[in-house]
Image (cartoon, grey):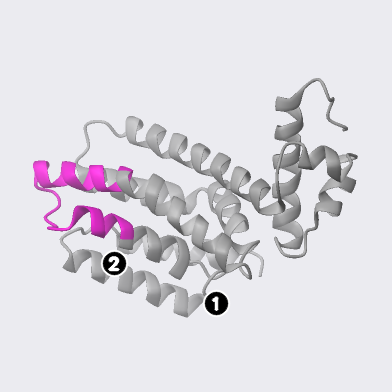
Amino acid sequence: MVARKNNPKQAIENIITTSAKLFAEKGYDKTSMQDIADTLGMSKGGIFHHFSSKEDIFNAAMERQFEQIIETVNGWLNEMQGLTAKEKLRGLIKRNLMDERTMKEAGNMVSSAIESPQIILAFTQNNLKKLAPIIADVIREGLEDKSISTAFPDECAEVFLLLLNFWCDTDVIQGDLPTLHKRFQFLQYLLRQLGADILEDETINSISNFYNKSPV
């Protein structure tokens, strides 16, 4: 559908939504502004009226996704009121990793720009800036309720997210199922050494089963 000129908000939404789909299907580098324009039925000039570049569109799509992820995470945390911090973090991990829609959307966003280092860097920085503080706050709750004992709440949250969302994502760092399983086992060991025993054996096995059922 062609976005109406008198509805700039809808035009921006259409551009972001359509571009995100194209990025996921073709990859960031292989998606041109002309591809986006043709799919939308707009002129490139119409797109440039709202966005200065393809990277600008990607950043907007990434920003929207992070807003949705943060809203989802906060919703999950609200549902887990009354649990210890360790239980909350274990619950977050299970829900995030077992939520196929969340995994697919986040994975598509990263993998679509895998050959564009500047985009991956921006995604990483957003991951640490927006999500790490939420995880760190829960870890601090764990210091209060004694369910977590790490001396590095901020650093633990950052390393956890970096390893979980990038190193343990085989679209970013290639690896077969046994390799992925070993990575999660190492992440579990590292977190335990840091005093944050939040990754359970059951969850690791569920992750392996999920990837084993997923199409290659």
Instruction: State the residue at coordinates (51%, 74%).
Output: 173
Which quadrant would the C terminus be assigned to in this image?
Answer: bottom right
Q: Residue furthest top?
A: 6
Residue of label 1 = 174
Q: Is residue 84 above or below residue 180?
A: above
Q: Secondary structure at mark 1?
A: loop
Q: Is residue 179 magenta?
A: no
Give residue 81's position: percent from left, percent from top.
26, 31
Q: Quadrant of residue 188?
A: bottom left
**Kind of residue sitting beneath label 1:** Gln
Q: Is residue 154 magenta?
A: yes
Q: Amino acid at mark 2?
A: Gln
Whether residue 168 appears in this view of the structure is no
* Residue tagged 2: 188
Can I make out residue 196 in this image? yes
Residue 186 position in % (x across, y down)? 31, 74
Examine the residues drawn in magenta and state their main secondary structure: helix
Task: Point out residue 185 in the picture as x, y percentages from the top left corner.
Answer: 33, 72
Q: Secondary structure at mark 2?
A: helix
Q: CA distance from mark 1 to mark 2?
A: 20 Å
Residue 109 left/right relative to 88:
right
Highlighted range, magenta: 134-158
Residue pictured at 24% horizontal, 42% vertical: 137
Sequence-wise, the earlier of marks 1 and 2 is 1
Quadrant (top left/top right/bottom left/bottom right) for the N terminus: top right
Q: Nearer the viewer, residue 10 or 137?
A: 10
Q: Relative to 79, say whether 107 is above or below.
A: below
The residue lying at 71 percent from left, 55 percent from top is 23
The image shows residue 37 at horizontal and vertical percentages of 85, 46
